[in-house]
Amino acid sequence: MKKILFFLMAALALTGCGALKPTTCSVQPNFYKYRYVYIMPTGSVTGSTGVYTSYVDNRVYGGKTKTANPADLMSGILMQKGFTILPQLDQNKLAETLVLSYGETGHRDVGFLWLSTSTGIIIQFRDAQTNDLIASAEAEDFGSTEADNVRYAIQKALEAIFAQPRYY
């Protein structure tokens, strides 16, 4: 019994289980006065798992590949929350428009035997007229692919922003 306990303790000490960084956010009281959001264009994130690539015939075998576009993910969530997504900035609606930007803050090895890599993201909402920071959130998460990492982190960041109390 002592040998088994020692083995488990040694395995955990050698491999470690990295904890995800806590989600942080900041929301100004005037966040809910805005009705429109313009989302800065983002590129797609593609991730694969369990993939074998043949260099003989340039084909990929097995595993799964997922793609996510952060702008599409954020627009869907924001539309559910009642915001109107603008395809371009409208000069007549600037007083009620937020500009949303997204960025990745890096990758970290987490999980048992460092088999999982988390992706950190940051989301910022800025006033379209003044460029003042109205809300921001930073989150990280991990899934089976990098696309999952980004999807989960975006959901966590936006949930944190919308979990803040409304000021009227």
Image (spheres, helix red, strand yellow):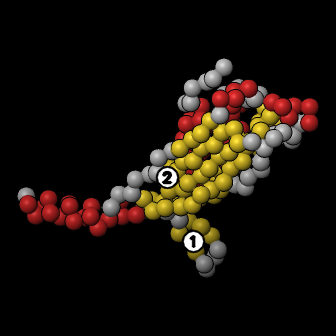
Q: Earlier in the sequence, mark 2 or mark 1?
A: 1
Identify whether 35 is placed above or below 120: above
Q: In which quadrant of the rendered image does the N terminus lie?
A: bottom left
Q: Residues within 10 Å of mark 2 (few under 14, many from 20)?
A: many
Q: Please state if 1 lies on the left or on the right of 124 as rendered.
A: left
Of residue 140 and residue 46, the one placed in the foreground of this image is 140
* Extreme residue in the bottom direction: 56
How far is the residue under mark 2 from the one under mark 1? 23 Å
**Mark 1 secondary-structure assignment:** strand
Tally of marks: 2
User: Residue 42 appears at what percent x and percent y?
Assistant: 73, 52
Q: Residue at x 36, y 64 (%)?
A: 113
| Disc marking residue 11 | none
| Disc marking residue 142 | 2
Residue 138 shows in this picture = yes
Of residue 72 and residue 30, the one placed in the foreground of this image is 30
Q: Please state if 8 lies on the left or on the right of 31 as rendered.
A: left
Identify whether 48 is placed above or below 82: below
Of residue 70 and residue 158, the one placed in the foreground of this image is 158
| Quarter location, residue 85 | top right
Q: In which quadrant of the rendered image does the C terminus lie?
A: top right
**Mark 2 secondary-structure assignment:** loop
Q: Residue at x 8, y 60 (%)?
A: 2
User: Residue 11 appears at what percent x and percent y?
Assistant: 25, 64
Q: Residue at x 65, y 46 (%)?
A: 123
Q: Amino acid at mark 1?
A: Thr
Identify whether 25 is placed above or below 67: above
Of residue 109 and residue 32, the one placed in the foreground of this image is 32
* Extreme residue in the right direction: 92
Name the residue tied to disc 1.
Answer: 53
User: Residue 143 appears at what percent x and percent y?
Assistant: 49, 51
Q: Amino acid at mark 2?
A: Phe
